[in-house]
Image (spheres, coloured by chain):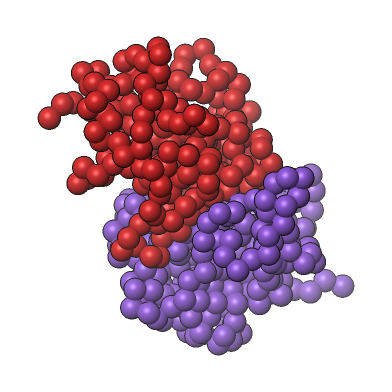
Amino acid sequence: MTVNKVFKSCDEAVADVSDGATIMVGGFGSYGGLPINLIVALSRQGAKDLTVIANMGGVGFELSKRIKPGGYQDLGVLFEKGQVKKFIGSMPALGGMPPDSPLEKMYNEGRVEIEVVPQGTLAERIRCGAGGLGGFYTPVGVGTVVAEGKERKVIDGKEFILESPITADFALIKAHKADNLGNLVYHRTARCFNPVMATAAETTIVEVDELVKVGELDPEVVVTPHIYVHRIVEVKR
Amino acid sequence: MKARLDEQTIALRAAREFADGSVVNLGYGMPGLCADFIPEGRTVFFQSENGMLGYGNLASDAEKDYEMINASDQPVTPLPGMCFFDSAAAFDMIRGGHIDVVVLGAYQVSEKGDLANWGRPGRPATGMGGGMDLAAGAKKVIVTMLHTTKTGEPRIIRKCTYPLTARQCVGLIITDLAVIEVTPEGLILKEIAPGWTVPEVQALTQAGLIPASDLKEIEL
């Protein structure tokens, strides 16, 4: 018996996201790897008081034109609509850009909370959450604001801090291809945070460029095993 | 006003530090330019923390694929032998000491090699990205930056006033005026921009500089 995981639209796939949910959003932050259609669907759906976990906070459509000609939608749409109460990530705003991203404007108005996490620590906290671990000691952040309030430990003469696991109610993921079971492969650097986030949520929702039949993906190249994937939407690009 | 080196020339000088066969990560902004200046005859494997090893130059407009970007969001070109992996694996490489050199930008570097490169007054919403992981994990940290701020204030100072990225991590500083090595004895002025004197560079540097016995003009 196999459950049908394929949804007709991104809107249907995010319909049950409730107010107050914690959402991981894959990608690196800019265009490649971002589940843009799922993000826009969540913005239409309107869930509020969300906690969003993503590498970057996005720059919004106007500033995105500096990254990719013509621009693109990103996480900015959720901040613009005031749907997010807390953002957790490594680059809420880019120092090399003007302070005009939706998240930075919201933050400066005191309307959203930010937890800034070093990028590798973010990936590892998600991996810990996904893998049932209680945390890990890392040298990253020692002697900085990141270490404040955290347990310190010296191991073999080197200083470490304790970091905690993260999980989410939903993960929004972008992959290149899925089969009907939910096995996933990615395209180039659009992989980034997607595989690790796909493993760490109660419900993982994936938008893919192409849906193929079971058996068409080479098992040697599957990156995300299907048990982690709960919903699939094909959005041809 | 005396001429200073431009960003391309700073990147070119930094790229001369890459040994044949080394694994190099390039940080956001100016460091990314280094990809175009690998010394002839050397092979360098560029690692990018968004999950890529062994990429080529920055892509021309015709070649651009926005699903193949470096960590500065710039499309780059593929090379034979390259590979992709996810963010968790990318940072295992970085924290685990598998990166020979990282080139990072900086707002400030202290005389002890403390690095401040992610937060500045008036921009509380910026983040460190992968900078803390890279500064803590790479075998050698090279900083490329302008020697002074837009208003002429020194960036190489006794103690950083901006939020730290990591303590005592910087090995070499390459600016538009000088090449400076961070050592336990202090900051050694190794090379100096054409037409500049030691007192002139020291006047724009808050931390004390120790001129190297073999101090020379920056070689390009």
Q: Which chain is purple?
A: A
- Against A14, residue B13 (above or below) is above
Where does the image place residue A14, in percent across and percent down from the top left? 58, 78
- Quick one: which residue is furthest to the bottom in this view? A19
Q: Residue at x 79, y 53 (%)?
A: A215
Q: Residue visible at 68% across and 64% down?
A: A151
- Is residue B100 visible to the viewer in this orientation of the structure? yes
Quadrant including the N terminus of chain B: top left
Residue B46 locus on image (x, y percent):
55, 32
- The red one among the chains is B
Residue A72 in view of the camera: no
Give the side of residue B17 with respect to residue A23, left or right.
Answer: left
Q: Where, by quadrant of the figure, is residue B147 drawn?
A: top left
User: Which residue is more in the foreground, B15 or A18?
Assistant: B15
B215 lies above or below B157:
above
Image vertical order of residue A45 relative to residue A198, above or below: below
Quarter of the image that includes the C terminus of chain B: top left
In the image, residue B106 lies at what x, y percent?
Answer: 39, 44
Which residue is at a point 30% across and 36% down the rendered structure image?
A: B205
* Drawn side of residue A88 relative to residue B111, left or right: right
Instruction: Determine the residue positioned at 34% across, 73% down.
Output: A108
In front: A94, or B95?
Answer: B95
Residue A188 vs residue B157: left or right?
right
The image quarter containing residue B20 is top right
Give x and y (percent) for residue B211: 36, 21
Q: Quadrant of residue B119?
A: bottom left
Q: Is residue A37 left or right of residue B220?
A: right
